[in-house]
Amino acid sequence: MGLETSKDPFLTRVKQSEKDTFMQKSVAKAQDAQWDKREAARKELGHWQDWRNLGEQIRQHVIKYLPDYLEEFADNVEKRGGHVYFAKKDTDAVNYITNLAKEKHVQRVVKSKSMVTTEIDLDKALLKIPGMNLMETDLAEFILQEDDWDEPTHIVFPTLHKNRDQIREVFQKLGYEGDNDPTHMARFAREYLRRDFLQADMGITGCNFAIADSGLINLVTNEGNADLTMAIPKTQVVVMGMERLVPSLKEAEVLDNMLSRSAVGQKLTSYCSFSGEQVAGESDGPEDLHVVILDNGRSNALGTPFESVLQCIRCGACLNVCPIYRHIGGHGYGSIYPGPIGAVLSPVLDGYEKFGDLPFASSLCGACTETCPVKIPLHRLLIKHREVMMDKLKTDKAFNKAIMKGIGMGTGDPALFQMAMEFDHSATLPFVSKKPTSVENLYNHEGHITHAPSMAKGWTDVRDAPRPPKHTENFRRWYKDHEAQKGETTDGE
Amino acid sequence: MKVVVFSTCVVDLFFPNVGAAMVEVLERFGCETAMPKKQICCGQPTFNSGYVADSQKTMRNEVDALLSVDADYIVGPSGSCVNMLHEFRMHLADDPEYGPKAEQLASKSYEFTQFLYRVLHVIDAGAELDAKATFHRSCHMTRLLGERVAPFVLLDHVKGLQMIPLPHIENCCGFGGLFSVKEPEISKLMVNEKVDDVVSTGADILIGADQTCLMNIGGRFSRRNLPIKVMHIAEVLNSNVDMSRVRYANEEELAAMAGGRD
């Protein structure tokens, strides 16, 4: 699948999302439920703003000293007997892992949920190996795999767009004969997957946090599947973004706490593990551990105004509060990283040509910035992307550019603005409707506008526009008359 | 107390009723107002669209115009535009001349209800309006300017006004400045849900502290031919005022105010 999930133009995807009323309802319902759970979990912790400051400091510190922490982490993984591979690009990571699988004659792979392995499109490459059997073991990812590799729509809730009946249909193909009760279906999946765990000769996981001073991998899940993936197969591959580090267990404890509360509104997820290569005296864990540390465009952000996007801990809270995501869903974004974080991150990872539409898909309401547990100024970074595209790369269409120049001039020059205020009542006449409107106190100046030309068409495609007052009736004139009246009163006294 | 009226371009271009109501309320509470003629716009239309270079002249013009009168405060009828005045500190920080001016500007700029509540300490503005209404909470005012309380306190004390909570009050109405024009398809989905939520309250009047949001939601009401009256909060607080009803914050309320502007 890779980072890009669709070749359709942005507008086509938006139109598809608009038609998908089931998805819209599911997302809205999930957002509303999460709003209560998340805020309650944060309130229970107390001093949330102080925690955010701490979370931000930890992440900023790690990004600032990233090379040092990467080196420390890699050294510690190797000290325990593990291997570390730095992958510059997605293909480097994929090649390393597929070669490893071939060398070791791996036939059965179990995976636990990992956005990064979706980003590098690892599953497809592994399945090209003859005889390879690969199983996604996260319940939602398992459903997507069995539904002919459907795309995830959320970084924490990948199957948000599916209901229980759709999932039952997917399971029926695997021999499930029960009803649509989630408990029954989950039990079926559990039994189905257990075989794969026990037979697997390679496990692949992502990584929530990599602990630099011990070389351990920290994973948080609610299903325990990551722990089984880590504990059972003899060969273990961990794929992680290069920014996913924390200095020590102390910082992991802070961030796990914030991650769980922000992502799912829980104090802590059901499972939270710290593991590495099996060492003497341990009864389980991989005998051969490979940690693949992936750049794949992340270093594009270093030293730029976008550096703070690397602070992200992938909690998905910004998706859960985003009014755009609420309506267009994950598929609308066309990136495996959707929502506000995806709109900021995707162009950083893979450029404006593919993802240049995303930074404009925001009303800049700031809900993302407000909820982010590590204080990434997401809506400001969206404006920054727009600035790079408009001011520096000049990607805008000439026509829009001319209009924006015009607005820039009109709002920067008092004389031009005065002219605009004086002329626009009569200038709007050709577009004015004088039919009665259902709305009171919005259209007080002889009609309203139903079909505006040029750039304003986007407005009137959706809603009516007010007609400007005559220049003798605008606010400036009112104030002038008001002042004169006051003056007369004063003079009279 | 001298107050500069920050009129905002939208009020200047479309809504004299909003500007007039704000000025009348301010003067009723003893403010001497002034309106610098050269002011135009806070610069958000171009700045938020990414035309940051083209916004420089607009921002500097606004700074100079609003500071051209020696006043105690600058007050505007829009949480979003006033927040932008505050953000000039960030956007003009590197300018040795305008950086300090932007600091000065921000230190005395207030959104209208914020000024009434936090500076003048008004709890009851003496207004009366016999109606059932709901309030749309605008995003920039709430999240960026950090004003979550003032309009609600003032509306709660309008005589005869029954306020119904708006479901999904946390969600944007889909205005977003030129977003509404450039992404009408997404904006439509957002404003439709907002209209449905307003309708679900059964309110006769939709009140807001940002006229642009009201222009968006009201515009969709009109297009869907659904009845509603829209009022800027300044118009509500300017309705049937009886000065004998005016009440200022007591000590307990003053204590509650402190720290509310985060």
Image (cartoon, rainbow, N blue to C red):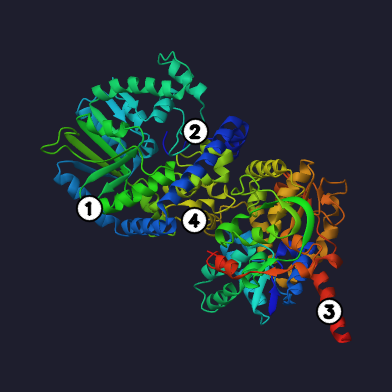
Secondary structure beneath label 4: helix
First in sequence: mark 1 or mark 4? 1
**Do the residues indicated by labels 2 and 1 lie within the same chain of the protein?**
yes
| Distance (Cα) linking label 1 and label 4 | 29 Å
- Of the residues shown, which amino acid type is indicated by label 1? Glu
User: Residue B202 vs residue A61: left or right?
Assistant: right
- Do we see residue A9 in this rendering? no
The number of discs equals 4
Q: Chain of mark 2?
A: A
User: Residue A259 vs residue A72: left or right?
Assistant: right
First in sequence: mark 2 or mark 1? 1
| Distance (Cα) linking label 1 and label 3 | 74 Å
Residue position for label 3:
A486
Task: Give residue A160's mark.
Answer: 2
Residue position for label 1:
A71
Task: Give residue A381's mark.
Answer: 4
| Foreground label between 3 and 4 | 3
